[in-house]
Image: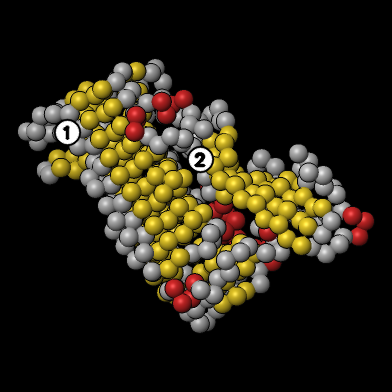
Amino acid sequence: RETDTPPQVYLRALGGYVEVASVARRGRAEATVTAQVAQRPPEALRAAVVWGDTLSPLTLGGGTTVTGEVVTGPRGWTTGTLTRRPFRGGVDGPSTAMRGDPLPALDASTFQETLDRLGAYLDAAPVPEARVLVPAAVPEVTAGEGPYADSVSVFMAAPGAVLTALDVRALPEVGRVVVLCAGDLRLDGPLRLPTGTQVAARGRLDVTESVEGEGVLLTADRVRVEGDVSLQGQVLARRALTVGGGSRFSFPSVLYVAGPSTSGAALARDDRLEIEDAVVEGSVIYAAGEGLPVEAGGREAARLVASPEAVLRGVVYAARRAEVRGLVEGTLLARGLYLFDSPAVYVGWLVDATVDREARPDPFYVPVGLGREPSFEVVQQRASVRRVAPVAGGSVPRVSGGPIRLDSAPAQP
């Protein structure tokens, strides 16, 4: 339909996605359409397993079964006997040995920009004394939320706060909700977060006991999710993330660990991404690359761990060693593999895992930046209309969006 002025388009990073908002006005009605844009799977995800170690072969052990293609470096793959247990699995699919590194590149810019933006929110926000949700006016948040600047609601929680259903009832159901905590924070269900809620904690974030929500974005240095939690959205952790206790993340969800944010910082013993007895539909990514050192006295063990009870539907990406013993319905991409089976350590072994590329959800999308030749797809879209006051001259005021390397300024479509 015709509008009084051309629509204004805003772009910003939102975890593994790019958020695109288009704002148009006609008379006293202002319409905003917001879409989250992800990426179609790159060519590498046609395979069931992609092994990124170019110096060593991939070894399959125990009852590992692979349905789909196995892509490796020049050393290929083999089978082995594990503590007197011969290989009893199998591979149902072709094998391809590449001359170089077959692991697709991961450009984590959108994740990092999101963590930086939420970190700036925390830096600018006041710290309340009471351990309850307190409304706050934070200009940095208003500016960072772009076209939602007039409808964003910011709440602060004191370090160590435990938020229950009684606290969450104070959160509005419309507009954008941002909850900030300068220390540790706990969401203690049963409770339901408003759609699109963003929660950022400086220290540890615990999400327990039947917490629900859609389109949520949770960030902290360390995150633990357990106790029959049911969410759809993204969890971004700087150091560690654990999901268990029968929790479930429905498609399209993203679980992501970035690694230490300070240049030169070392990985601690418990810096890892671990999926216990949980179901995750979407993308599970441990992005801290091989350049990061391990703290003094530490040993480079697995940084992405999927237990035998884990069910992962989509893509599992490990930029360092992984230990995967659960079910992957999709693609496993790993720079390395690690298993401790007393009394021995097995490096480069995939043991007692089931990887089935044919069972991957369809349609399926991955975070922006996975692979070098991206093509994009809208995964979620919402529209809203509100009445606004007349603007002198009939023009629509421009609102600055959050930073993104693509283009941070409003642009004509």
327 relative position to 155: left or right: left
Three-letter amino acid code at the position of disc 1: Gly
The residue tagged 2 is: 367
Position of the C terminus, as image quadrant, is top right
Residue 85: percent from left, percent from top: 9, 33
Instruction: Give residue 63's mark.
Output: 1
Judging depth in this view, the residue of 168 and 1 nearest the camera is: 1
Residue 140: which quarter of the image?
bottom right
Position of the N terminus, as image quadrant, is top right
Mark 1 and mark 2 residues within 8 Å of each other at the beta carbon: no
- Disc 1 or 2, which lies upstream in sequence? 1
State the residue at coordinates (58%, 40%).
378
Q: Residues within 10 Å of mark 1 (few under 14, many from 20)?
A: some
SS for callout 2:
loop
Residue 9: percent from left, percent from top: 73, 45
* Residue 262 in sight: no
Judging depth in this view, the residue of 53 and 196 nearest the camera is: 196
Residue 347: which quarter of the image?
top left
SS for callout 1:
loop
Residue 54: percent from left, percent from top: 35, 25
* Residue 287 in sight: yes
- Cα–Cα gap, marks 1 and 2: 31 Å
Three-letter amino acid code at the position of disc 2: Pro
Q: Residue farthest to the bottom?
A: 130
